[in-house]
Image: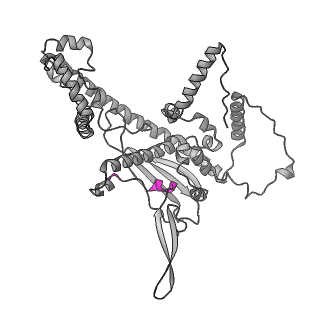
Amino acid sequence: MSEPIKKKNGDISKAPTPQNTPASVTSSYLKSQPPTVSTIKEEEGEISNAAAQTIANNPMLLSMIQGKLGDLVGKQSGYIDSLSKPTKNRIYGLKSLQLRQMKLEAEFQKELLNLEKKFFKKYEPLYEKRKKIINGDLEPTAEEIEEGEQLDKEDKEAEGEEIEEEEEEEEEEAEVDEETSKGIPNFWLTALENLSTVQETITDRDSEVLQNLIDIRMEYLDTPGFELIFEFKENPFFSNTILTKTYHYQAELGYSGDFVYDHADGCEINWKSKENNVTINIEKRKQRNKNTNQTRTIEKLSPTESFFNFFDPPNPKANENVEAEENEEEVDDELTGRLELDYQLGEEIKDRLIPRAIDWFTGDAVDFDYPEDFEGEEDEEFSDEEGEDNEDDDEEEDDGKKQPPPECKQQ
């Protein structure tokens, strides 16, 4: 369930073509077939070069040809159709074997989902106790405190940090007001802000609202999918105590054997006033009547970026109402990007935040962020620095001396 979005259609760009067919195959099956393109003479080659130069000098003609060639990308070359009947029969047999394997894969994925649900039921009492400790309704046992201290000590030792023995304070200094020391303030807000993908969606106005968040949990659906549940204490922003976001998967598995994301459903937030609605901006300006000289205040409401837009997910069907003059391709790309981000946020909250909430609160989980988050960035963002490093290396080699690598500084 934690796999990324899987496309419904397989990539056929790797279908056999004369360019990617192994030489051994071409020699055995294609050698006996006469070429369909006549040999080009040297004189014709000279004419072709002149024609190519003419095309290159005509941008409109070049664009048209490129468009035609683009339509051929990913299309099969007809190589399979050219094979003999016995060879085709063997291919059909392999397809049958693959179908049986894919049916077993589907059974595996469904069994895996049932296993996840089974163990999730065992997690729920622990999550409920975590909620009570965070909100000050329960204190951890002495054994739990001791075990947690030992784990923290081992982590610091593994990182090479010096461990300072805490001095026991005087009893009168240890006594604090129960109200001010209740639970762990801003636990979920801090955890969310340490999860980089989610943190990018949280504004300063959102932070004020998320201070009222007392629990984040999830539930599996009867059908493939899950529901995220955000529980809030009474607050001045909205009247809801529960906000939900539900992710649905398709009933049939995708080509790769994984569940395929279908759509998400949000919920309506009952904001107590326009001023407290962090998903909109209110622009006020005054207008004066030329005849009566009276003034009035005009309010203009406009949507704005907010974490709480998470509960109003993008709707693919809304794209059907796009006006004809708009660039539909750009709209489709934007919608696809929003859907992928929405799916990613839900999966990260489900698979990373909820199970490891305390590590995201302390920041320990940040050191174990997924390496995929940085794939592709190094070549793009640090290409210049790499070039400079290469130049420095060349200079060092000329000097005949090797310099130590620069110190890696982390904050």
Taking the spot 85% from the left edge, 51% from the top edge, the residue there is 173
In the current view of this chain or complex, which residue is farthest to the bottom?
Answer: 292
Where is residue 171? Give x, y as percent. Answer: 86, 49
Task: Report the front residue among 8 and 386.
Answer: 386
What range of the chain is rendered magenta? 306-316
Q: Is residue 221 visible?
A: no
Quadrant holding the C terminus: top right
Tell me how many marks there are: 0
Magenta segment includes 307: yes
Would you place residue 205 above or below residue 399 in this image? below
The image position of residue 46, as x and y in percent, is 20, 21
Residue in the picture at 23% in, 29% down: 52
> Is residue 135 found left or right of 312 in the rendered image?
right
Residue 113 x/y as whole percent? 41, 37
Q: Is residue 319 left or right of residue 143?
A: left
Is 37 drawn above or below residue 136 in the view shown? above
Asked whether, in this view, residue 213 is left or right of residue 4, the answer is right
Q: Nearer the viewer, residue 133 or 164?
A: 164
User: Does the rendering let one see residue 138?
Assistant: yes
287 or 84: nearer the eye?
Answer: 287
- Spot occupied by residue 53 in the image (x, y as percentages of width and height): 25, 30
* The N terminus lies in quadrant: top left
Residue 160 magenta-highlighted: no
User: At x 28% / y 29%, what residue is drawn?
Assistant: 13
389 displayed left or right of 347: right
Tell me the colour scheme of the image: one colour
